[in-house]
Every structure is written in C-alpha cells, then in structure tokens.
Amino acid sequence: PLERRVMAAVKASEARGDPPLLRAVEISRLVAGEPGAGVPSADLAGILVSNLCFAHNSPSLWKLLDQAMSSRLLCPLHVLALLTARVLPQRRAQPEAYRLYLELLKGNVTSSSLSLLAGSNRDKITKSIDAALQLSKSYGVSGTDFGHVVILFVLIVITKLIDSVLEDCGISSGMTQDQESVYPIEGPQPMDMDVKGVSAVKQNEQREQLRRRNIVMALEVLHIMAADTKIQAFLRLICLNMPDKFSVLSQRLTLIEAHKMALERLLPTSHKIDDLVMYIWRVSNLDYQPNNKRLVGVLGNLRSSNSMLGQLTGAGRAACWIIFDIYMENAMDGRHLGGISAIEIIKEMSKTAQAINEASWQETFKALWISALRLVQRAREPLEGPIPHLDTRLCMLLALIPLAIAAILKEETDACGAEGNKSLPRRLGLVSSLQDLVQYSGLLVPPSSLVNVANAAASKAAIFRANCKVVGGNPSMIGQSDSSTKAVGNMLHLIVEACISRNLIDTTAYLWPGYVVLPGHSKDTSLPQESPWVNFMQGAPLSDPLKNALIATPASSVAELDKLYHIALNGSEQEKSAAAKIVCGASLVRGWNIQ
C-alpha cells in the first residue's frame, strides 16, 4: 500500500540524515507514481497526519510535514483541518504536538494561505476536510465545496481555539458533550522525544510549562486571524448570512468578557485579549465597513437599501457581495503574481458567495457583473500615465469574468449532460443577470475610448434585428448587413459580445427588449452619442470645437492616429498646430495606442 511505502521512505531518508526538502522530494516521487495522482496530494496528507497522531509522533516528521506544505505538495488547509480534528482534543496529553500544530497554524493561517486552491484533487480534499471537521453535520451545509470550507474552517478554528484557551485557563466554555464529540478522541501516546537523563518529575514540570506557553501561543494565533482583513470579511459574511452560526462565536466573546479579570491574571498578553474581542465584535456591528481606501476604493454603504453591495435575496436579507470588489481591486496590483489562475479564484469565490448568501445564480452573476463594472468606472478618476489601468480593468470585465462564468456553467453541464443545456438554472441565471443590467445606466456609460466600439456592438445588434424582421423572424436566415444602421452603445453591449464569443449565450440576445437604442431615442442623456473621432475619420475639418473634443478624447484605433500623423506632417500650418495639440492630449496621456 502507499502508506507503507511512504513511511518506509520517510524512515530510510531520516536514517540517512536527509534534510526535510530532500525527504519531501522523495515522497513526492512515490505519490507521483500512483494512478490519478495530483498535487496537492490528498492521500499523502492523510498518511502523514494519521502517523503523526500519534503512532510516529516525532519532530522530524513534523518538519517533513511543514516542508511538504511549503512546497505545495500538500494543501495547507487540508493538513490544518486534519490536525485540528486530531490534535485539539489531545492538547493536554500531547502538549508538544499541540505546540507544533500551533506553529503550523500560525505560519499558514493568513487568508492568502488558506485560500490556496486544491488543484486537481479539489473534490477529494474538500470531502476529506468536510469529513474531518464534520462541516455538513455541524453547519447543515449540503454539497460543500472548497470555497465553503475555507470560510467555515476559519469559523470553526477560531471557535475551537477560544474554547481551548478558556478551558486551559480553567474556565468552562459551556460546550455540550455532543459538541465536543464532533472530534474523535484517541488515547494519548507520549511524543517520541529524546529525554535521556531527564527525570520523570522534571519532564512533567517541563510539559506543564509548555502547556502554559501553549495558551499564550493559541491566543497569538487567534489575534493574527482576527486581525486579518480578509478573515474579517469572511466573518462578516457569516455574521450577515448565517447569524445563528455566528452567535456561537458571540457566546464565546461574551464569556471572555465575563472572565476578563481572571484571564488577565493568568496571561501576560492581556492586550491581545482586548484586541481579539474588538476585532470580532467589530464585524458584527451594523456600522462596520472595511477600510475603503486600502481595500476597494469606493465600496458604497452596506446599510443602504439601494447599495449594489447589499442586494436583497429571496429570503429578504441583505446579501453581501463585497468579496467580489475586494478581490478585483486587489487583483489590479501588478506587484503580486498569484500562483492560482484568476479564473479559478473567481469561479470558486462566486460559488462560495452564492451558497453563503443563499442567493440565486441570477443574483450572483449580476453582483459579479456590477463589481466588474464598478472596477472599470473607478479607472476614470486618475490619469493613467504610462500604465494602461483601463485596459487591465476591462480585461477583468470582458475576459476573466466571462471565462470564470464559462467554467461555472461547464460544471453544471458536465453534471447534467448536454441534454437541455439551455434550460439549466445557471445558464438561465446568466441570461437574466445580463437583462437586469439595463437598469444600471450609470455603470454602463463607456469610457470615452470605448464609445466607438460600444456603438459598433450596438449597431451590429440593430442590423441583426432589422434583418430578422426582413426574413420573418428566423435568425438562421440572416446573412446580410447594412452599414448605415447605427445605434447607441454602452458597456452592456460589450459584455454581451464577450459572452457570445465564449458561447455563453447566443445572438438571440440582440432581440432582448430595450437592447437596441437608436440615435435620438436614448432617454439617458449621460450616454455619449458618438465619438468625435468618427467625425474626424469621415473628413470633418479640424475646427476649434472638433479639435477640443479630440484633445479630450483618446483615439480608439491606430488608423485614427495614422491620419492625424499625416495631417501633422502634410497639412496647413493651422492643421499642423491643431494636430500637434491633439497628439499631446488625451491620446498621449491615457491611450495605449500611442505608447
């Protein structure tokens, strides 16, 4: 069996004195030879943890486990979940193992480490975590996926560590026997430590000192978790959408406050107790908002009934979609290159938010589109300089989001088969979400550099609609075009075109009510009707009004700049002067074509 070969390799490597990295490489070769093997390995995590707890409980095996996690041979969240279920109930009998568990937890407890995806073994790892922590049983969540377990893991670890600190300080947490029995209790076995020449009394004293230090260490880990801004966002989601589950954590905070004086006498770091309570109580406060400047820029008011971050679900509760804005804004930071595909992250994040908010797929997709549109709108404020921020944000809206949705739809298609593909709930939710975007006219105003492209997309739909009427409403017979047909476009037309190009929807979207708006019929005066570059390309002279408009509007194609360059070289003195000013205007400051 794999376990026997792995442990034999571990012991042989340990006998040779190999460093942890070489030992990790050796066992990775064994795992790679298994059928259906993938990295991170679910089977290897189970083998190492089961031997640590507590058949072969040795410091060298803990070092190997840490190296395997650092090398991403093992999923950190998976390992921590397995250890949580086994080590916490035995923390008094196994203080050395508890200490090493806390060290691993401290090094991998940040939201960035916890949210590392589980690769090709995601489903297997998810089921293993669910079984170890019994999340489905404890939280009544069926069909748990990796996104769910990240958030629920945070809640259960914080709650269990608080229980451990209280109980180790002699304060009952009020936990019932049924709650405690969520974790299997195994008979304690002493850790394989070198205690030659150390009396039993001396060893017991050292272990008791270690138990007291472990209480402080557990409090430090809790402080790190509660101070993490993304973990606070996770707790906020649980507070808003699973208030009965968050109340369990609230009861622990109340207990801490009731025994605050006793804890301060026992623990040297009383200020961390105050901070811990403050951080967690803060996310349950109705007035709580994350740091807008540092996280998302402009996020809106969570309490507002008109807030696009707090849309109502069918259950009548405010659904929190702020996690979309947080991720998209952070993804714009080019200084950090993620190890996981943004498409995969958005997919998992959408599934998690949909489940936690108990929202429909229509609401979930609409929130995703709105967050991406808000991202694009925030690019309007600062001048770009040499870095094309707008292009990057448009990539999120028109490429990454459609690809993530495509992956979500594919999961449903694979599960249900190709039959009835168009009637699947997720696909219907996508269509409804796109149709709902019409009402957000302010978000749909295209940047000036995209006006021509948006108008072209709308005109394409207008031509399709006109030809559809000519052929009696049969889209399959449409093949002609009329370049004279024009329409007013916005960001929705670009989103729809992106979805059509990915085969997420078909061209029947062109027939949606209100999708095609002809010039002069737009009720929204905020929508730009036509770019001045269109008039310029059609031969309009460079009069002062046109010159001023071209200076303020970036060119949308190289052809426009080529024509302007030709005028700057060969035009009249007045035209040369105007062309030079236009080149030094918005096209140079914000346009990627010049650069």
Image (cartoon, helix red, strand yellow):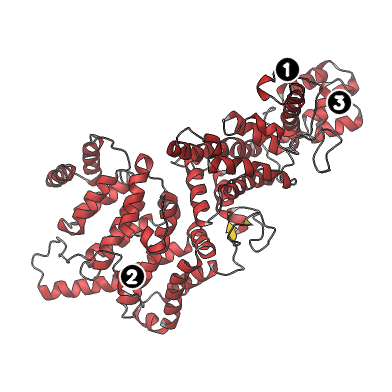
* Comes first in the chain, label 3 or label 1: 1
Q: Which mark is residue 577?
A: 3
Seen in the image, is 46 located left or right of residue 326? Answer: left
Q: Nearer the viewer, mark 2 or mark 3?
A: 2
- Whole-angstrom CA distance, mark 1 to mark 2, is 69 Å
Total marks in image: 3
Residue drawn 60% across the image and 29% down it: 501
Q: Secondary structure at mark 1?
A: loop
Residue drawn 31% across the image and 38% down it: 38
Q: Quadrant of residue 530?
A: top right
Residue 579 appears in the picture as rendered: no
CB contact under 8 Å: marks 2 and 3? no
Residue type highlighted by circle 3: Ser
Residue type highlighted by circle 2: Gln
- 10 Å neighbourhood of mark 2: few (<14), some, or many (≥20)? few
- Whole-angstrom CA distance, mark 3 to mark 1, is 43 Å
Q: Secondary structure at mark 3?
A: helix
Q: Which residue is mark 2?
A: 179
Q: Secondary structure at mark 2?
A: helix
CB contact under 8 Å: marks 1 and 2? no
Give 433 or 300, whichever is nearer the viewer: 433
Q: Quadrant of residue 590?
A: top right
Q: Which mark is residue 480?
A: 1
Residue 403 appears in the picture as rendered: yes
Residue type highlighted by circle 1: Gln
Q: Is residue 107 above or below residue 93?
A: above
Point out the image quarter for the C terminus.
top right
